[in-house]
Amino acid sequence: MRHLLRPFWLISLILYFLWDLFESSLEVAWDVLTPQTLARPRLILLKLEGVTDAEIMATANLISLTPGSLSIDVSDDRSTLLIHDMFGAQDPEGAKQQIKSGIERRVLRVMR
């Protein structure tokens, strides 16, 4: 049954990523174009649920493709991802939760 749902989960991942891309592009553009700086950068350590190279790579790359965020490094034991978030200092736990419940959850659904 899971194999039958895989195309649905892939479409869900693509649509979520496109929405996230649109939303974060507007947020970054607004910050650049307005005189007041809203950016409060922060390095975030995200505990990964993905264990395979493909799961980690897909999660890290989709995070990096989103404006305002960048995957910097994966820990040696491949359990933690270091992320630079342009707006992460405003709510670091919220930023982690958004990544975990958004990109990472959808990547794992497609890959597993």
Image (cartoon, helix red, strand yellow):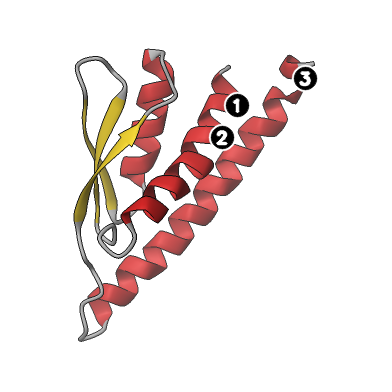
The residue depicted at 43 percent of the width and 44 percent of the height is 99
Of tags 2 and 3, the one toward the viewer is 2
Give the side of residue 27 with respect to residue 71, left or right: right
Residue 51 placement: quadrant = top left
Q: Position of residue 109 (x, y in %)?
A: 60, 26
Q: Nearer the viewer, residue 11 or 79?
A: 79
Distance, label 2 to label 1, CA atoms, is 5 Å
- From this view, report whether residue 55 is shown above or below residue 35: above
Q: Position of residue 100 (x, y in %)?
A: 46, 40
Residue annotated with mark 2? 106
Quadrant in which the N terminus appears? top right
Residue 105 placement: quadrant = top right
Whether pointer 2 and pointer 1 mark residues with C-beta atoms closer than 8 Å, the reply is yes
Q: Which label is found at residue 39?
A: none
Q: Which label is found at residue 4?
A: 3
Q: Which label is found at residue 109?
A: 1
Give the side of residue 70 with respect to residue 101, left or right: left
The residue depicted at 31 percent of the width and 22 percent of the height is 79
Q: Identity of the amino acid at label 3?
A: Leu
Give the side of residue 78 with respect to residue 95, left or right: left
